[in-house]
Image (spheres, rainbow, N blue to C red):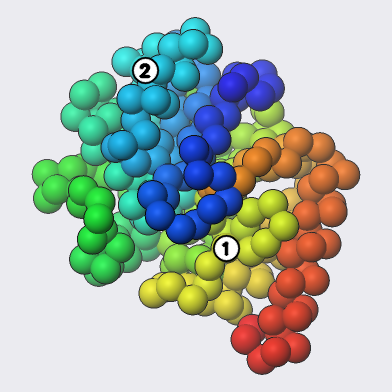
Amino acid sequence: MHLTDGVYFYASPGGMDFSGDLCSNAIVLKGPTKLVVVDPGTLKRLPDLKAQMIDDGLNPADIESVVLTHSHPDHIESAPELAAKYGARLYISRIEREFLLETAEIFFTSYVRPGPDVVFDLCDEGPLIASGVELRLISSPGHTPGSLSVYVPQARLLMTGDLFFPGTIGAIDLPGGCPGDMYKSVARLRDLGGVAKVLCGHGPAIIDRYMIIQNYRALFAEIAAKKAAGIV
Ligand SMILES: [Zn+2]
């Protein structure tokens, strides 16, 4: 689905249902000649993602860059396939690459693990130009230690991976989750100026300022309740 100038949003088939066959939302950013995909999702969903891109006039063979918000398989399983088939570069944070090596055995039980031959481009917080698209990577630990949020200044679009969703924060009780980091990361993103749209790793698009403000209210109410219960 074409969301806004140069931004295409492909919602995960499961929505916010975290049981069963999990797959993330995928976001495609159009550069001058090539494409960036943020979190391509699972191998099972890849044919459908490509079909939807073609419907929108995008050529999957133009995928040149893949940016991974974090290393969970529902977000990254199909990334090595995009590298092998189209020569796409796979960007992941330095910390998250380490975390992936440590935890693949836990998280990839029912998914295909990235082989030892898969090359990742390691990145840190800061600016990144991928396929001619200006991005700003923001370190957002809490759900995993090396999670990144991705901001696209030109589209005033923020992508949060699994840090939070519409109405709720991401899981903090999985290996690598940290309630204190989650709280700080959500607060940091809330204070980021100029954001007009937010796309999360799961769930529908948050498409205007009012919805964004309401959502942060809900997130902080949840964090306050968790703090009161002694979880954060
Ligand atoms: Zn995740």
205 up-or-down from 229: above or below: above
Along the viewing direction, whichever of 210 and 96 lies nearer the viewer:
210
Of 103 and 91, nearer the camera is 103
The residue wearing badge 2 is 60
* Residue at the spot 78% in from the left edge and 58% down from the top edge: 216
Residue at 66% across, 24% down: 3
Locate residue 66 relative to residue 27 in the image: left or right: left
User: Where is residue 61 shown, x and y percent of the image?
Assistant: 32, 15
Report helix, strand or loop for mark 1.
loop
What residue sits 39% from the left and 25% below the top?
48
Residue 229 in the image: state x and y as whole percent: 70, 89
Q: What amino acid does circle 2 point to?
A: Pro
* Residue 195 percent across, percent down from the top left: 75, 41
In space, the residues marked 2 and 1 are separated at their CA atoms by: 29 Å
Q: Residue furthest bottom?
A: 230
Q: Pointer 2: residues within 10 angstroms few (<14), some, or many (20+)? A: many
For badge 1, the amino acid type reads Gly
**Residue named by callout 1:** 170
User: Which residue occupies the extreme top position in the image?
Assistant: 57
Report whether the residue tagged 1 is closer than 8 Å to ligand 1: yes
